[in-house]
Structure formats: C-alpha cells, structure tokens
Image: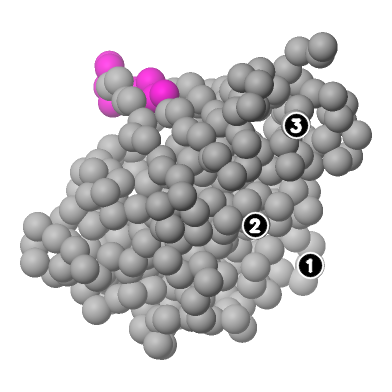
Amino acid sequence: MTGPVTIRAQDMAGADRLMQVIAALSDVFGDLSAGRTRSPSRTIVEHDRQRQLLVGPAVWERCGFGTVKISTLTPDNPERGLPLIHGVVVLVDLETGRIMALLDGGELTAVRTGAVAALATRLCAPEDAEDLAVIGAGVQAWALVRAVCAVRPIRSIRVFSRRRAGTDRFAERVLDSLGSGVRVTVCETGKAAVTDAAIICTATSTSDRAPLVAADWVARGAHVNVIGGVNEAAIEVEPALLSGAFLVVEERAAALEDAGEVRAALTGGLIDLAELHELGALVNLPRMTGGRTSVFRSVGLAIEDTAAAAALYQAARAAGAVSSSSGSGP
C-alpha cells in the first residue's frame, strides 16, 4: 500500500487540467443546488492585524472524495514578497478513509477560484466577449485571466493595480503566456481599465468598505466577477452596481455571511434576498441575464476545494503520475 501522493503547483498547470476543474465544479454546484451534497462553513480564526487561519472540510459523496483544507491568509505578505495565501489540501477516499493526496493549498485555491469565475462567466457573459478588465495583479488575478480566457475569446486585457511595478510584471507575464494575439494594457486608474469592458474581474486584498470600482464605470450588459477582499465587510465594487443586475452567488447563506457587497446592498435596500441566484441553479439552464449587467460575487466554499482536488488527482492518475492502486475514485 502506497502513501499519499503530493500534487504540486506545476502539477495543476495547463489548459486541460483547468477545463477538468471547471467541469468538476459545474457538477458539484449542480449537486449542491439539488441538495445532493452540502458545503459546511469554514472555521476562521482571526489574529494579529487581520491575519487568518482557516480550516474547511467537505465531502462530495457522488465523486467518492472528501477534503480538509488548512490555509492562512496574511494581507501584508505581498509587501514581503510572499504569497497572500499558504496552505495544504488533504484528499481522502470516502470508501476506505485513506489519505490519497496532499495538494498545494495556495495554488489549488487560485486554480479553483479562477475556475469558479470561469464557470460563472460561461453561464452569464456574452459568448463573443473579447475585452477583459482586471483590478488586481496578484496570484489570483493571474488565475482569473487564465480561466476567463479559457471560456471566452479574449483579445484585449486592461489591468489596474495600486502597485505599478507589480502591475507591469503582471502584464509581462500575461503577454508571455497568451502571446501576441492578446493586447495587454496597464492603466493608470481603475476607471480607465473598467470602462467599456465586456468582462470585469476584481481580485484584490482590500479590507476597506470604500469600493474600488464605481457602479457607473461598468457598461450595461457587462459581466463582473467579484473575487477579492479579506473579510466579510470588504467591498471591491460599489453596492449600487448590484441594483438591477443579474446577481449570482455560490450559495445564499455563504454570501450573506461573507460577501461585503451583498451584505451592504441588502442593508441599504438596494436588492432583495430573492434576487440572489445560486450558481448551481444556472448550470443546466440557458443564459438568463437578458442583456442585463451580471455580477458574480464569490466567497469560496469548501466543496469547491473538494471538487478541484478530486479533478486534479484524477488528472494526475490518468497521466500516470499516480498509481491506479492509490485510489478508487471514478
């Protein structure tokens, strides 16, 4: 009997792996919406200067796997040249109880969060959307660019971040990865990046309640993925944007607990609870935005880690990196 395999960041790279994670997330959100699985709340311990230790377990019965993720969120790490998130994900075979794999938690978080946004983009954004605006220039912003480009024919990317040097490096990375077929522009302001963009992604480590994106910057019919923020009060986009938009969340209860924009919009009477559409309910339906602006507010669920870890483990096994005797999954 072999021990758990290690799945590193480089083992999660590549378009094929990304598409497998997106497919797994589509399936798990369908199960979540239908009541065939659930995603328990994470345990979050906050300590010095908004640093967090997070633990999140979940099981996906149909797939035969469970996970426990232990991660840390340290807002001042980018100033040290360190990742915002560190962690490990433990993948468990539900039938035998064996630990099958240990996955790099920081990279898995980036991959699955980008993949969730890609799923929402595929369900909500115009199929011919070519223009992408990104607010943020960190690990998660890169994962969003990669994921959105996998589901839409992006030809132009505009980027804004408060740290210009880091933004320039980010733009160079995007160009190196995507090639000359995509135009990448570093903008001086968030407004310049967002104006007229068909798809907008925010991925920052803000802890503020002051929005980084104003509602009137966003073109009618655009799709917005709101990903960042380090606490439940943090706001990346002006809550007024949610009024009249087609609103998508992973799970209503989780959004009410952790999504700053949703909480502020509800408190301000800008939206009603009934206007929050869960992602899983849209998976098997045609696009329902009706030309309206759409906003996906992600907070991250433990079951997403389970689906992504299972997909990446199965991909590694199919590629011969994992012995068939190391697990019984589908």
Identify the amino acid type marked 2.
Answer: Ala
Between residue 216 and residue 163, name the one nearer to us. Answer: 216
Disc number at residue 328? 3
Image coords of residue 195 (percent x, y): 42, 75
Disc number at residue 23? 2
Q: Main secondary structure of the magenta part?
A: strand
Q: Which residues are magenta?
A: 47-55
Image coords of residue 61 (percent x, y): 55, 40
Classify residue 178 by image quadrant: bottom right
Identify the amino acid type marked 3.
Answer: Ser
Q: Nearer the viewer, mark 1 or mark 2?
A: 2
Image coords of residue 242 (percent x, y): 26, 69
Alpha carbons under labels 3 and 2: distance apart: 20 Å
Horizontal side, residue 150 vs residue 288: left or right: right
Disc 3 element: loop
Residue with the mark numbered 1:
180
Relative vertical location of residue 197 with respect to residue 213 in this rendering, above or below? below
